[in-house]
Image (spheres, coloured by chain):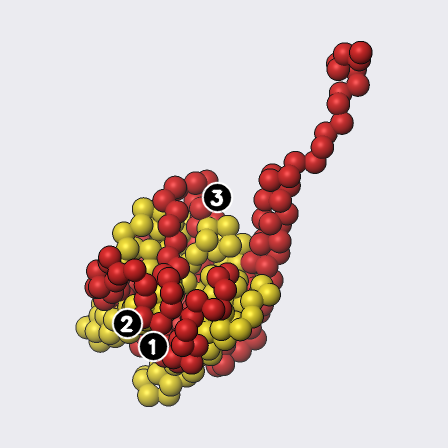
Chain colours: A red, B yellow
Amino acid sequence: MSESSSIERPLAFSVVALASGLLFGAGLVVGGMTSPDKVRAFLDFTGAWDPTLVFVMGGAVLVHMVAYWLVKGRPSPVLAAAFQIPTRRDIDAKLLLGAAIFGLGWGVGGYCPGPAITSLPGGGISVSGFVLAMLASSWATGRIESRVGTAAANPPRTPPEPNRTPTR
Amino acid sequence: MDVTWMVRGAVGGALIGLSASLLLVLNGRVTGISGVLNALMQPVRGIELVWRALFVAGLVLGGLAATAVLPASGGGAPGLAVAVVAGVLVGVGTRLGNGCTSGHGVCGLSRMSGRSLAATLTFIATGALAVLATRGFSVGVER
């Protein structure tokens, strides 16, 4: 995470974050994305296919492309010193494995992270169970990832093989 | 499909696009919900904690407000056991794959990221497989 000092107007920055969350949550409900039935029906390509999600994602991408066009070439956003936009371009196995596992869960439950959080108030025990399981498993995976990453960066010193290493 | 849902989908999508655009143009951040949640589980402080907490609060409140004024969008919440299994898969998958439907599907596709396109096609494909595999079972048992 970057240091907080790069954000000169924290109040305005916070208000924008709240407004963005409000719009996102409202958009999910308006678009029917908080209904697992509708999401699963979109993924049901061989059955009674429901294209609503295409309109939601298409509408979102069309609007958001304009924003990327607006900020193209700008050195910084309005309320912070720098953009924090992912820059990786490699398509690695971990990305595809993760996306594949995520998709399985998305199809089984009909929830992805946003709609699950938005559905928390009226969603009953199953939505709470989904969110808790999602947060716990993501946290645990992150812990394992960082351990593996640390181990790869600082490999444990392997003792010399006694039988093969010629001694002086 | 009925026209009502086409319109609701497009309007809902436009609201989501507007949400992501506000956060990008003004705050310079990407609206990746799994990323926001993951950061909240790390020792972030100050404004980095506050904006994410407010975004998540907005997500809930915005949903409540829309639910109050709109006809129901249909349910289909899975049973608890299925929900927990799905939650584990979504948690592990979004962490390994660095994003979900919002980060890869909306933000990534909007900036024409090949990584995000690959991720999006992959999770739609395995999502379709999961629905195909579980369609016969009564997954949609309400609580």
Tag 2 near tag 1, CB within 8 Å: yes
Q: Is residue B29 above or below residue A46?
A: below
Tag 3 and tag 2 share a subunit: no
Residue at the image position 43 percent from the left and 77 percent from the top = A10
Query: To which chain does the residue with label 3 belong?
Result: A
Expressed as whole percent of the image width and height from the top left, the position of residue B48 reads 49, 69
Expressed as whole percent of the image width and height from the top left, the position of residue B107 reads 33, 60
- Whether residue B15 is visible here, answered yes or no, is yes
Q: Is residue B33 above or below residue A152?
A: below
Give the quadrant of residue A23.
bottom left
Amino acid found under the numbered disc labelled 1? Leu
Q: Which mark is residue A130?
A: none
Amino acid found under the numbered disc labelled 3? Lys
Query: To which chain does the residue with label 2 belong?
Result: B
Residue at the image position 21 percent from the left and 73 percent from the top = B7
Tag 3 secondary structure? helix
* Cα gap from disc 3 to disc 1, whole angstroms: 32 Å
Q: Quadrant of the N terminus of chain B?
A: bottom left
Residue position marked by numbered label 1 in the rendering: A23
Q: Which mark is residue A94?
A: 3
Residue position marked by numbered label 2 in the rendering: B18
Residue at the image position 48 percent from the left and 61 percent from the top = A2
Q: Is residue A135 above or below residue B8?
A: above
Of residues A5 and B90, the one drawn nearer to the viewer in this rendering: A5
Of residues A93 and A150, the one drawn nearer to the viewer in this rendering: A150
Tag 1 secondary structure? helix
Query: To which chain does the residue with label 1 belong?
Result: A
Query: Are there few (<14), some (14-19), or many (20+) residues within 10 Å of tag 1?
Result: many
Amino acid found under the numbered disc labelled 2? Leu
Tag 3 and tag 1 share a subunit: yes
Closer to the chain start, of discs 3 and 1, is: 1
